[in-house]
Image (cartoon, rainbow, N blue to C red):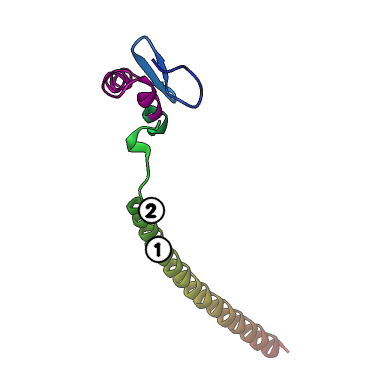
Amino acid sequence: MIPCDVARPQVGRHTVKVGRQSKPAWADFYNGLAELLGRERAETLMTHLPRNDPNDLVTKSDFSELRSDFSELRAEVRSDFSALGERLDRMYLTLVAGLFVIVAAMTGVLFTTL
């Protein structure tokens, strides 16, 4: 059995603890390697194996897909902000035109009462 320490999977009664998870399969794997390759080589191999769940590992294709998703999202956000800017421009013009009409109406009322 390989000694317990932080750098390597911990082996105890046919259970290897990898990170926070206990995996009896790792102990069985180590024992098989030790029988096949010898204890020293099995320990060397076990220290170089990933200690994470294979489903947690990220590949370059995952990053590529994520980059593509972010590019699409960025384009969508830019489009939405552009549309929002156009709406704000139209609203500003509407408010200015409305203010102009109100000022003209008030001026007309002022001149008709004098």
The spot of residue 71 in percent (x, y) is 40, 63
Query: Which residue in the protein does label 1 denote?
Result: 71
Left or right of residue 85, residue 76 in this image: left
Indicate the amino acid at tag 2.
Answer: Phe
Q: Nearer the viewer, residue 50 or 97?
A: 50
Work out whether mark 1 precedes mark 2 in sequence or the reverse, and give the earlier one.
2
Going 40% across and 33% down the picture, which residue do you hit? 48
Residue most extreme to the top? 13
Report crowding for label 1: few under 14, some 14 to 19, many 20 or more residues within 10 A (C-alpha). Answer: few
Q: Quadrant of residue 44?
A: top left
The quadrant of the rendering that contains the N terminus is: top left
Left or right of residue 99, residue 46 in this image: left
Instruction: State the separation of the CA atoms marked 1 and 2.
Output: 12 Å
Q: Quadrant of residue 16?
A: top left
The spot of residue 103 in percent (x, y) is 65, 83
Q: Main secondary structure of the magenta part?
A: helix
Q: Which mark is residue 63?
A: 2
The spot of residue 20 in percent (x, y) is 44, 23
> Is residue 57 shown in magenta?
no
Q: Nearer the viewer, residue 36 or 108?
A: 36
Query: What segment carries the magenta color?
Result: 23-44
Indicate the amino acid at tag 1.
Answer: Ser
Q: Note whether 38 is above or below 63 in the view shown.
A: above
Going 35% across and 32% down the picture, which residue do you hit? 53
> Is residue 38 shown in magenta?
yes
Q: Are marks 1 and 2 in contact (CB under 8 Å)?
A: no
Left or right of residue 32, residue 94 in this image: right
- SS under mark 1: helix
The spot of residue 21 in percent (x, y) is 39, 22
